Amino acid sequence: MPLSPTQTRELLEQLGHRPRKQLGQNFLIDGNIVRKSLELAGVSEGDHVVEIGPGLGTLTQALHDAGAIVHAVEFDPTLGAHIERLSENLPNLHLVKGDALDFPLGDLPEEISDYKIVANLPYAISTPWMASVLESRLPSVMTLMLQKEAAQRYAAKAGTKQFGAISIFLHAAFDVLPGHDVSGSCFYPKPDVGSTLLHLRRKAEPFRFSPESIQLIREIFQQRRKQISSLLRKAKNETASRWLAKLEQAGIAPNARPEQIDTESWIALEKV
Ligand SMILES: C[S@@+](CC[C@H](N)C(=O)[O-])C[C@H]1O[C@@H](n2cnc3c(N)ncnc32)[C@H](O)[C@@H]1O
């Protein structure tokens, strides 16, 4: 069970720690959300699970109790020391004290290819951290607490204003299930932004874009309302010229706007 708001305040006092807003320190105090996260991720005995930002250890303890081998990364030195003390009694908890942008998968051993990610993310780093995850071994599932707007971008479909480069990269590799909005009262202190619990399941055949294509798609989306053909002409690199010549073959109209081109069509463009 997670700590109640009173227990959370008491523990923070004991640690002499004030929640740091810039590190997104909004701790989970709702048992249902912890349970739901584990349930969505289907955590079971022996699973390797990466957790970003264990904080006071609520989710960490629940993952460990479910039999997972937890690979956690905590940036805050006070909370890192707290988790390190917890780990003395949790043999399957492995902590990296550092930045998740440097250790996006914690200390997950190279040879482990089957793993999950379950985290109440520090909202400020969610997108660059996700970009690193997409470049590494892909997890079988990710169950993530995210800022609502980030979750909307990750889940967005073509033709919506939230649809962007990250939506394409995620949808190419994962089924992104509808998210659950989570009330601010499930955290201490209450965040001043909305939160969504999002669940992603790796596809049977996940597709990954090459680094050059990732770069090009990101550039293209900086001018999402321009026509794809003129953006590709302007980009002046080998991938852009190849795509320009293959637009029709990939079923994309030259005057289509990037935000209207769905993930399958971007994949077709990369494959032709
Ligand atoms: C939203 S809190 C989640 C805490 C805890 N997992 C929970 O659910 O109660 C985010 C956590 O991420 C940590 N954090 C912030 N930035 C980080 C970074 N760059 N790398 C690793 N951890 C970070 C914070 O210190 C905090 O513990």
Image: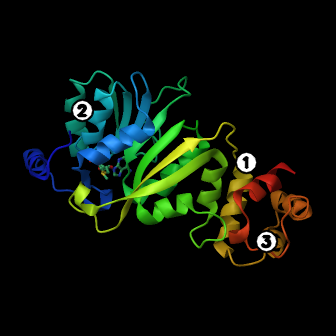
Earlier along the polypeptide chain: callout 2 or callout 3? 2
Looking at the picture, how far across and down is residue 185, in whole percent? 23, 60
Q: Helix, strand, or loop for circle 2?
A: helix
Question: Residue type at mark 1?
Answer: Ser
Residue 188 drawn above or below residue 86: below
Identify the residue under disc 1.
210
**Residue 113 marker:** none
- Hey, what amino acid is under mark 3? Ile
Query: In front here: 187 or 83?
Result: 187
Which element is circle 1 on?
A: loop
* Residue where numbered disc 2 is placed: 84
Q: What's the amino acid at mark 2?
A: Glu
Q: How is the image coloured?
A: rainbow
Spatial CA distance of label 3 from label 1 is: 19 Å
Q: Residue 29, image x and y in percent?
A: 21, 50
Tell me which residue sits at (52%, 46%) in the image: 200
Quadrant of the rendered structure where residue 81 is?
Answer: top left
Q: Is residue 162 visible in this depiction of the protein?
A: yes
How far across and how far down the image is residue 105, in percent? 47, 37
The image quadrant of residue 238 is bottom right
Q: Is residue 113 above or below residue 118?
A: above
Q: CA distance from mark 2 to mark 1?
A: 38 Å
The residue identified by callout 3 is: 228
Task: Mark 3 or mark 1: name the one nearer the start of the chain.
Answer: 1
Neighbourhood count class around disc 1 (C-alpha, 10 Å): few under 14, some 14–19, many 20 upward: few
Neighbor class of circle 3 (other Cα within 10 Å; few <14, some 14-19, many 20+) is many
